[in-house]
Amino acid sequence: MKYIFVSGGVISGIGKGIATASIALLLKAAGYRVAPIKMDPYLNVDAGTMNPIEHGECFILDDGTETDQDLGHYERYLGESLNKNNIATQGAIYLSVISRERNLEYDGACVDIVTYITEEILNRVKHAGKSKNADIVIVEIGGTAGEYQNVLFLEANRQLKLKRHDDVLHIHITYLPIPGSLGEMKSKPAQMSVRDLNAVGIQPDIILARAEKPVDASRVKKLSISTGLEPEDIISAPDVKNVYSVPLKFEEQGLTDRILGKLGLKRKETDLKEWRAFVESSEKATKTVKIGIVGKYFTTGDFTLMDSYISVLEAIKHASYKVGVKPEITWIDASKLEESPQQLAKFDGVIVPGGFGSRDVEGKVAAVKYVRENKIPYLGLCYGMQLAVVEFARNVLGLKDAHTTEVDPDTKDPVIHIMPDQVKKLLKRDYGGTMRLGAWEAELKPGSKIRALYGKEKTSERHRHRYEVNNDYRAALEKHGFKVVGQSPDNKLVEIMELEDHPYFAGSQFHPELKSRPLDPHPMFLGFIEAASKQKAV
């Protein structure tokens, strides 16, 4: 196997995940089997217990692993499902080594960080490759060069390079800012981030030069001289409107051939036809569809972030491009809707995504009521479906106190309640990795819109929840038109609900956004966007 390490410098959020996913796609298109793996420097064992505002979306895999959002990028670009072997946090690595030490598996040795931790890192890298029978393993190192947090990942990189020099490549993504007061692109921060790598014994083989604009020849020359790389090994990576065009931009600059040449490999094929067609179709769309996302995980200080719902955003794009429309997405603070839900009239479609807790819940319920009554297409994801049930129970069934026990444990009408197996876990404060996680099968009801969209009898979808629709209220909900059109094979769990006599009003207990792909949009998002594209917003 060959190994490519990808690091970042200067700033966080520089785009390592997109770059790693793009490189993986290009190498797959060149005829090679690839296995990406994310090395995250935090000490959390997984991403499941972290605040999405702080760390971004928690992406769930088929096997239930709660991962970093970059795994979503990998899956979307590769069009493949990954598993627990494609993620390793520093917390999980330390936990594994310490557990072995406690079991005397090191025969009484003094267990040091080097080499025991670095050996565990490399074991996981190699295992990721073997598990997918890969030709090339692509290792994304979280954080930025110069931080203490990721130095052990870089040390593992250095050690592997010493042992297998010709089989290991390092790609460094760095940033060239253009300060507004100067109006000139500056290369010094990029130079210093490479020096940070040099300080821990790593010389990058290729630089991806991120900037607002394409990096000019003058800056490339400066970087070449200061880093010791040939100019051809410095790839310009300017900001783009469409992240799915990034692989094509890299291909145009010869990145694939530079990588293969340095690893002693030859291109077997070039298979980017479908990807190129997808990108071209996305850029041709002219009709706009206005989508409102009602959430609470996207504000930090004075800034609005999209990372908390990145998979929802991408699923909207996939479906929109397939339908031939351009999505115009607005982030709506749920706290501002309780008193004035009529602001939703300007949207062609509304989504309430997943979430937890009581904050701003009444604003979301008000949003659901407004779009239901005003026939605006609606898609509720996990919590978004549960709150649709709460709203319907209150305003159609007449159960004014109806609620989810997650918010009101003493509600008279618990239309959403905790799953029985979750009660003991919460009492023990057993939170990490204990929800209903991963892919579970659902049977789809014949004659429903959802069944028609899927075009099949069953589906397997990814879950992350502790609460469910209370079956005691199921008959009443269905009698009044809110139908269960997807359920678990044993009929005990509600998976999808659909409202009759509405352009599109559907909710899923699972997260369909996690399995949407650029070349294969998710059926529930397709149905939603198709309905929204026919809507005439006020």
Image: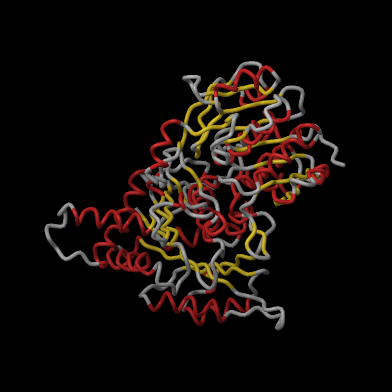
Considering depth in this image, is 485 or 177 the residue closer to the camera? Answer: 485
User: Looking at the picture, how far across and down is residue 406, in whole percent?
Assistant: 54, 40
**Residue ranking furthest to the right:** 538
User: Looking at the picture, how far across and down is residue 487, in whole percent?
Assistant: 54, 23
**Which residue is at a point 48% across and 43% down the rendered structure image?**
60
Which quadrant: the C terminus? top right
Figure quadrant of residue 184: bottom right
**Residue 444, relative to residue 170: is it above or below?**
above
User: Looking at the picture, how far across and down is residue 128, in whole percent?
Assistant: 36, 49
Considering depth in this image, is 456 or 237 the residue closer to the camera? Answer: 456
User: Looking at the picture, how far across and down is residue 104, in whole percent?
Assistant: 15, 54
**Which residue is at a point 56% across and 20% down the rendered structure image?**
457
**Which residue is at a point 37% across and 69% down the rendered structure image?**
151
Figure quadrant of residue 285: top right
**Residue 313, relative to residue 392: is it above or below?**
below
**Residue 504, relative to residue 490: is it above or below?**
below
Q: How many marks?
A: 0
Considering depth in this image, is 297 or 238 the residue closer to the camera? Answer: 297
Q: Is residue 33 left or right of residue 124?
A: right
**Which residue is at a point 69% across and 46% down the rendered structure image?**
294
**Residue 51, relative to residue 527: is it above or below?**
below
Considering depth in this image, is 138 or 391 the residue closer to the camera? Answer: 391
What scheme was used to colour the molecule?
secondary structure
